[in-house]
Amino acid sequence: MGDSSGEADRPIVDFSIPERIVRWRRYAREEARAAQKAADDNPAEAILAASLATMYLALAADADRFGELPEIPDDEVGGDE
């Protein structure tokens, strides 16, 4: 998922919700293509790529529907050791 525009170094939190939706939809298309290409030769890779595509589409749909994203705490916060 290379971004030749130089925005690849920007953290996702710096993007507006509409920008995030566009990026996640683009990422979903890229992963769906990767899944389709890998389907015959490497089923495990195809499943992973399809899962990522689904995740990106779900993120885009939630952001589009609600106009915001829920705060998700880091795994390290309050983690049990």
Image (cartoon, rainbow, N blue to C red):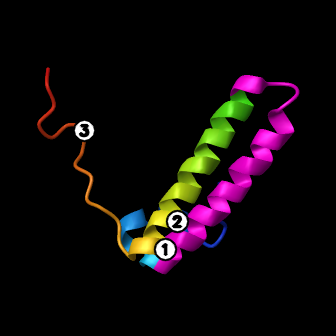
> What crowding class fits label 2: few (fewer than 14 Cα within 10 Å), some (14-19), or many (20 or more)?
some
User: Dot 3 lies on which element?
Assistant: loop
Q: CA distance from mark 1 to mark 2?
A: 5 Å
Q: Residue at x 85, y 40 (%)?
A: 37
Lateral position of residue 62 relative to residue 45, left or right: left
**Three-letter amino acid code at the position of disc 1:** Asp
Q: Residue 3 appears at what percent x and percent y?
A: 63, 64
User: Dot 1 lies on which element?
Assistant: helix
Mark number for residue 61? 2
Query: Which mark is first along the chain, 3 or 1?
Result: 1
**Is 38 within the magenta?**
yes
Lateral position of residue 37 relative to residue 10, left or right: right
Q: Residue 31 appears at what percent x and percent y?
A: 69, 48
Does residue 68 sit above or below 53 in this rendering? below
Q: Label 3: which residue?
A: 75
In the picture as drawn, the residue positioned furthest to the top comes out as: 81
In the picture as drawn, the residue positioned furthest to the front comes out as: 65
Q: CA distance from mark 1 to mark 3?
A: 25 Å
**Three-letter amino acid code at the position of disc 2:** Ala
Q: Residue at x 58, y 67 (%)?
A: 23
Q: Does the CB distance between marks 1 and 2 fall below 8 Å?
A: yes
Q: Label 1: which residue?
A: 64
Query: Which mark is first along the chain, 3 or 2?
Result: 2
Which of discs 1 and 3 lies nearer the camera? The answer is: 1
Q: Residue 62 appears at what percent x and percent y?
A: 45, 64
Q: Which residues are magenta?
A: 18-44
Of residues 10 and 61, the one drawn nearer to the viewer in this rendering = 61
Mark number for residue 25? none
Lateral position of residue 20 relative to residue 75, left or right: right
